[in-house]
Amino acid sequence: MRVERPILVTGAAGFIGSHIVKKLIKLSADVHVVVREKNNLWRLNEIKNKIVLHEIDLREKRSVYSLIKKVKPSIVYHLAAYGVQLKDESPSLLFETNVNSTVFLLEAIGRYCSEPKVIIAGSCFEYGDVKGKINEKTSFNPANLYGVSKVAEEMASIIIAKKLDIPYIICRPFGVYGPFEASYRIIPHIFLSIINGKPVKVTEGKQVRDFTYIEDVADAFIKAGFSKISSQKINICSMIPIKLKTLINRAVEITKSKINIQWGAIPYRSEEMWSLVGDNSTAKKLIGWEPKTSFDEGLTKTWEWYKNNRLFF
């Protein structure tokens, strides 16, 4: 891959965004990243001297237009979002961040960029609770406001991108895990509980999920950005259903810990989704991507990382 023009990554301080940035750096790309002012950049510390940092609020139209006019990116990876942590569901912030900022971004790209491409991070939460494998034609049925906001973002993006003739791909990641994941997520929660000698408090673990290692997910976004296809929606997933109880038991086994697992200590959410398992056939066909990291390999790598980086948490 040859990279000649700037690449912009929004949400670059986040879990997926930071891994994409690191892969772009390895490709010798001219990487510009967007983060909120005073955002914690701990995921980017090791490469901060290799990126161009822009601290702006994407909800401010003037700031977005000024940024795009200045950078004129060839590829934009748009991962900035609010509400991934479901307890943060402020309806106004959800739609200002996940919809309005995306509209501003696309309008600015259409005005100032020559031959751009936009890769937008969708979400498996757009689908809601679905039995069986979910493909890109599965109807939307979000069970929470975050999912609703991502559906709205996607629908607005498609209409605006077509109107402004902007090539786009929407990537919908499923259960992403690995190094640098936020501590409130299930796998870090297990590993950090063990590291700190605390009981592992979980639900009864009946939910079924689809887990994909972060390096594989970042590869999918990179492939999408450098591909020649456009106007597509792509699931980024493993296609392997794993019950959370199985995940939790396996994670503990990998640590060789005798820690106490307190099943049912955490109640199910009122809007609990019992099954979220994707079909990655479209990703295989269109961008030649499928996950390379087995679940056990990914869990082991993640455990080793948390053991060696406990000071972050």
Image (cartoon, rainbow, N blue to C red):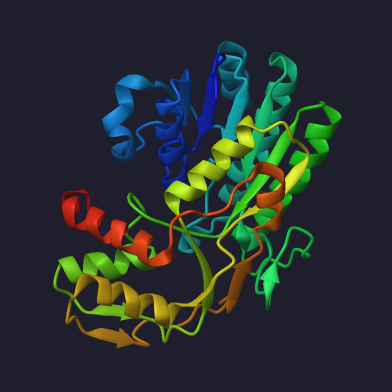
Q: Which residue is drawn at 65% across and 74% down?
A: 129
Q: How many labels does the image show?
A: 0
Give the x, y percent position of residue 296: 37, 67
Q: Looking at the picture, does residue 145 appear above or below residue 12?
A: below
Q: Residue at x 60, y 69 (%)?
A: 277
Left or right of 195 on screen, residue 101: right
Give the x, y percent position of residue 160: 80, 34
Left or right of 263 on screen, residue 103: right
Q: Which residue is drawn at 54% across and 19% down?
A: 3
**Can I make out residue 36 in this image?**
no
Indicate the quadrant containing the C terminus: top left, top right, bottom left or bottom right.
bottom left
Give the x, y percent position of residue 154: 72, 47
Q: Looking at the picture, does residue 89 appear above or below residue 92?
A: below
**Occupied quadrant, residue 159:** top right
- Of 117 and 85, which appears nearest the observer? 117
Left or right of 57 on screen, residue 52: left
- Of 19 and 112, which appears nearest the observer? 19
**Can I make out residue 164 in this image?**
yes
**Occupied quadrant, residue 37:** top left
Indicate the quadrant containing the N terminus: top left, top right, bottom left or bottom right.
top right
Q: Which residue is drawn at 75% across and 36% down?
A: 230
Point out the residue furthest to the right here.
163
Left or right of 165 on screen, residue 184: left
Q: Looking at the picture, does residue 203 appear above or below residue 83?
A: below
- Of 163 and 233, which appears nearest the observer? 233
Give the x, y percent position of residue 303: 26, 61
Q: Looking at the picture, does residue 114 appear above or below residue 181?
A: above
